[in-house]
Amino acid sequence: MQLRYSFRLYPGDGQRTALARAFGCARVVYNDALRARQTARGEGMPFPKAGDLSKTLITEAKDTPERAWLAEVSAVILQQSLRDLDTAYKNFFDGLKGKRPRVGAPRYKSRKDTRQSVRFTANARWSITPGRKLRLPKIGDVRVKWSRDLPSVPSTVTVVKDSAGRYFASFVVETGPQEALPETTPELGIDLGLGHFAVLSDGTKVAGPRFLRRARKRLKKAQRALSRKEKGSKNRDKARVRVARAHAGVADARREFHHQLSTKLIRENQAVAVEDLAVKGLARTRLAQSVHDAGWSAFVAMLEYKAARYGRTLVKIGRFEPTSQVCSQCGVQDGSKPLHVRVWTCGTCGAVLDRDINAAVNVAKAAGLAVTACRAQVRPGRVPAPRGEAGTHPTPQPSTAR
């Protein structure tokens, strides 16, 4: 499978200027190609192919005074910009055919977009120097903060400038079956929530860090300062970057939390079961901020690709499974319960159950995993005696009470 590794870049002043030039050239070629296809469609002409657009908008355009500056950047990033447009059109048409979720038609890129990127393939002859710097054509040797080693030789590298003004190098590498972990026996069910981020079927409860709520005061101050700056001024742009950096810090902390927890669960368990939650629907309720702060979809996506990478099994059960209504001890459905009910007693077997742990056990059982209801019963409850064993006699008996 293909994996993407991202590392922080620290370009110098001249390299920042060269990267800005590369971002601009790639954007111009993308917009020129989009305009050419829209014009051909409006005039009823055949859809221009990528090869024809490459010849017209890159090769021949470099010889014109209006586009002579395209020669100042690597031709590979301009070719990749045309490929990005082809991908955008393919996704759009596949959405119309029902092959994938619908997306909008390709749109023009603006120079005011806060996120910019260019991609270098092997044809660009980029390399990693002996001094562990990233050598990019017509940009130079850029300093990289290597947080870990790459598992294999990367095929492409994408240089990204995010909304906070940070630069990253994103490498695409191929991994093989040699990364599969030795088989283990534990199997686990996970119940995702808001009070606790995750409750496991073995009784473990993982607290929700709530990164957005913890940073609310700092974000509010930065956003208020941005609203008071004059539109179009440099001070407003500086304030926008401060807001973007505050949000980026929250997103980075949440992503790190997801990575650490998902890696731990995948390494320690042979099979993991989760519930297929309707995140989009929950995000339209009064719990929207808490749902987005938890980031369930990103966490499940990490579990999915890490399970495939390390030879584990991930099972998703339907969102309509009554995991909170079924007793994990006897399997009897006891009806729906309000959210404020965190502990309930089964009316059939008398088990006193923790709502979240019981749901996690039921998630694992619904996925067909061999788990036990460990710690699902908080304390033993009183079991009602059967009518044939403890009841009044069929015929009245004389009272012996004095």
Image: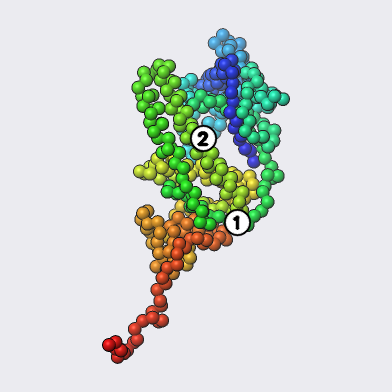
Query: 181 or 367: nearer the eye?
Result: 181
Please indicate, yes or no, whether residue 199 appears anywhere in the rendered image: yes
Percent of width and height locating residue 248: 48, 31
Check the picture and name the quadrant holding the N terminus.
top right
Query: 102 or 340: nearer the eye?
Result: 340
Residue 63 — which label?
Answer: none
Please indicate, yes or no, whether residue 99 appears anywhere in the rendered image: no
Residue drawn at (63%, 23%) of the image = 143
Percent of width and height locating residue 179: 68, 44
Residue drawn at (69%, 42%) of the image = 176
Asked whether disc 1 touches disc 2, contact meaning CB atoms under 8 Å apart, the reply is no
Is 387 situated above or below 328? below
Q: Earlier in the sequence, mark 1 or mark 2?
A: 1
Percent of width and height locating residue 113: 47, 24
Residue at the disc numbered 2:
252
Check the picture and name the quadrant holding the C terminus.
bottom left
Q: Secondary structure at mark 2?
A: helix
Q: Quadrant of residue 348?
A: bottom left
Amino acid under disc 2: Asp
Question: Is 116 on the left or on the right of 141, as rendered?
Answer: left
Amino acid under disc 1: Pro
Is 62 situated above or below 281? above
